[in-house]
Amino acid sequence: MMAMTGLDIAALVAAVAFAALVGFLIPVLIRLKNTVAESERVIVKLNADLPFILGDLREVTAHVSDMTGQARDGVEHMSQLLHKAGRVGEMIQQANRAVENTSNRLLSNAAGIMAGVRAGLTVVRRRMFLERLAHPPLPSFEVRSTRPPAVPTVVAPTPVADVRPGALQ
């Protein structure tokens, strides 16, 4: 028997390590083969379904684009409507101020007229009073009518029953 040299031992260790490596790599390669086959099936399915998916995606994109345009138009219309409503509100506020100013002027004028009338009546009353004091009225003479005086008719009062408690006794 021959003695094993260091080179022989190293070759033996390398052979055992290579065999162990191959033993571990075989299941990994089998799994990798299955994964590659599954990936190939997925790619074939994607290639078959991709045109339909892209068509649906284009259709959805077109709908979203239409809806975005409609929303933009709606927002623009709403903006115009709100702007007009604001202008109407401003006009109503201006009209309200105008009516308020006019009514305040009318009330102020009416109050002034009433104060003037009151002051005028006071002056007229004072002058009439002073006129009466300065010039008392002359005695009045009665003019008698040729007709005889009317005879007054006297109506007797109707007796009223006394309905107080104890009054009928």
Image: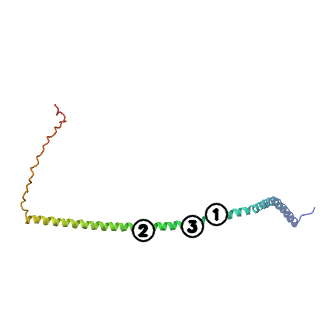
Q: How far across and down, in percent of the image, does residue 106 sit?
A: 30, 67
What quarter of the picture does the C terminus occupy? top left
Where on the picture, by quarter, is residue 87?
bottom left
- The amino acid pointed to by label 3 is Asp
Instruction: Residue at 66% x, 63% y: name it.
Output: 60
Question: Mark 3 highlights which residue?
Answer: 73
Q: How far across and down, in percent of the image, does residue 68 sit?
A: 60, 65
Where on the picture, by quarter, is residue 92?
bottom left
Query: In the image, 158: left or right of 26?
Result: left
Query: In the image, 153: left or right of 82?
Result: left
Look at the numbered disc 1 and give the secondary structure of its residue. helix
Instruction: Residue at 46% x, 67% y: name it.
Output: 86
- Quick one: label 2 or label 1, which is nearer the N terminus? 1
Please identify the residue farthest to the top as the structure is shown.
Answer: 169
- Quick one: label 1 or label 3, which is nearer the N terminus? 1
What quarter of the picture does the N terminus occupy? bottom right
- The amino acid pointed to by label 2 is Met
Question: Mark 1 highlights which residue?
Answer: 63
Instruction: Residue at 67% x, 63% y: name it.
Output: 59
Question: Mark 2 highlights which residue?
Answer: 91
Q: In the picture shown, does residue 135 fall above or below 145? A: below
